[in-house]
């Protein structure tokens, strides 16, 4: 008696796209636009021709990766999930860590890709959110800081804006120093700037 083995269901186009994008991101961070579709296919464990059933060309892959990197929603979601019962110090540490991850990811990717336009990504029509003090990210952060208003010299919205500008600034290679600031260094600086003396 023979036992039939069930064949794995073929991937949908969307699942295939996700697999390819997941394989492409670390390669793009390492090699920039010089990476080949063959290398992406090898990393994804597929034949090179399979890539072109999900994407038009390599440029579309790059555009989509970049669009996802600058999409703020995953960062907003992480900010929303901060424990509201944390102390002010712990809240700021959580925010700085989340912002550092976002900005370092964007800056690192864009630095290696260079000055390029990416008009075709799936989020390409969205706005660049992180430079405006009233963006959704700043509003979310301010809502958490509001709980600690009695300890703060700055208004929560202003404190959120300052934090975002500071973290973005230290993420830029242009402003790099011989000694890289740690997350603890940034948190300590933020606290000394917004906490009342003796609070």
Image (cartoon, rainbow, N blue to C red):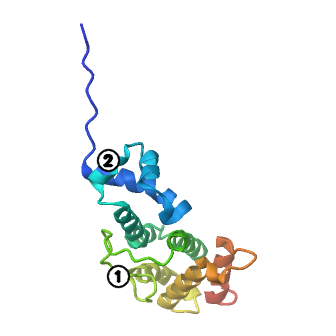
**First reached walking from the N terminus: tag 2 or tag 1:** 2
In depth, the one of 80 and 88 nearer the eye is: 80
Foreground pick, 113 / 83: 113
Crowding around mark 2 (Cα neighbors within 10 Å: few <14, some 14 to 19, many 20+) is few
Disc assigned to residue 50: 2
- Label 2, secondary structure: give it: helix
Find residue 181 and report its horizontal and vertical position in percent: 69, 75
What residue is shown at x 50% (from left), y 70% (from top)? 113
Q: CA distance from mark 2 to mark 1?
A: 32 Å
- Give the residue drawn at x 30%, y 50%: 15
Q: Position of residue 168 (x, y in %)?
A: 55, 80
Left or right relative to 180: residue 102: left
Dot 1 alpha-carbon crowd within 10 angstroms: few under 14, some 14 to 19, many 20 or more: few
The percent coordinates of residue 47 (x first, y second) are 37, 43
Residue at the image position 63 percent from the left and 83 percent from the top: 174
Q: Residue at label 1?
A: 127
Where's the N terminus, which quadrant?
A: top left
Identify which residue, 140 or 169, lies in the foreground: 169
Relative to 68, does residue 119 appear above or below in the rendering?
Answer: below
């Amino acid at each position: 008696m023979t036992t039939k083995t069930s064949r794995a269901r073929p991937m949908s186009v969307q699942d295939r796209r996700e697999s390819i994008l997941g394989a492409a991101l670390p390669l793009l961070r390492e090699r920039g636009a010089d990476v080949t579709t063959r290398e992406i296919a090898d990393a994804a464990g597929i034949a090179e021709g399979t890539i072109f059933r999900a994407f038009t060309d390599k440029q579309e892959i790059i555009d989509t990766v970049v669009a996802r990197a600058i999409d703020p929603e995953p960062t907003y979601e992480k900010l929303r999930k901060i424990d509201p019962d944390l102390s002010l110090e712990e809240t700021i540490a959580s925010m700085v860590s989340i912002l550092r991850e976002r900005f370092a990811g964007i800056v690192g990717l864009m630095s290696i890709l260079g000055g390029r336009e990416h008009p075709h990504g799936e989020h390409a029509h969205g706005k660049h959110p992180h430079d405006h003090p009233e963006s959704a990210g700043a509003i979310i952060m301010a809502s958490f800081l509001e709980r600690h208003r009695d300890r703060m010299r700055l208004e929560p919205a202003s404190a959120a804006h300052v934090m975002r500008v500071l973290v973005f600034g230290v993420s830029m290679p242009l402003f790099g120093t011989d000694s890289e600031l740690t997350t603890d260094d940034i948190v300590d600086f933020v606290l000394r700037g917004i906490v009342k003396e003796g609070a």
